[in-house]
Image (cartoon, rainbow, N blue to C red):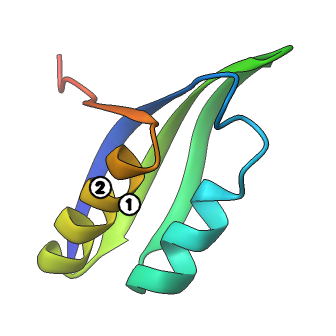
Amino acid sequence: MAKRRVILTYTPETITEPIIYNLGQQFKIVTNIRQADVAGDRGRIVLELDGEEQNIEAGIAWVISKGVRVDPVSED
């Protein structure tokens, strides 16, 4: 099992979609919200992903295809 932390940045077009729920369901990834800042029609979420590496990679690609920006969390 692999574990990764990423930052999801939502736009007004994506803020109402259940992206995190679908990510966990479709890609068999355990999601853990570590921090969230949602204000109005924008949002930034630090998300921990736990699962098989190939599922995490596919899930991240899917999230990006939905219009959500994904950045890695630096270990610094």
The 10 Å Cα crowd at callout 1, few under 14, some 14 to 19, many 20 or more, is many
- Image location (x, y in percent) of residue 73: 27, 28
- Image location (x, y in percent) of residue 20: 59, 58
Q: Quadrant of residue 13?
A: top right
40 relative position to 34: left or right: right
Residue 49: mark = 1
Q: Which of pointers 2 and 1 indicates the residue nearer the eye?
A: 2
Q: What's the residue type where badge 1 is placed?
A: Leu
Image quarter (top left, top right, bottom left or bottom right) of the C terminus: top left
Image quarter (top left, top right, bottom left or bottom right) of the N terminus: bottom left
18 shown above or below 27:
above
Q: What's the residue type where badge 2 is placed?
A: Ile
Q: 6 or 76, which lies in front?
A: 6
Residue drawn at point x = 21 percent, y = 82 percent: 52
State the residue lying farthest toward the right: 40
Identify the secondary structure beneath mark 2: helix
34 relative position to 15: left or right: left
Residue drawn at point x = 26 percent, y = 62 percent: 3
Identify the secondary structure beneath mark 1: strand
52 relative position to 38: left or right: left
Label 2 or label 1, whichever comes before in sequence order: 1
Q: 61 or 2, which lies in front?
A: 61
Residue drawn at point x = 67 percent, y = 28 percent: 36
Residue 22: mark = none
- Tag 2 and tag 1, C-beta contact below 8 Å: yes
Q: Which residue is mark 2?
A: 60
Residue drawn at point x = 35 percent, y = 50 percent: 65
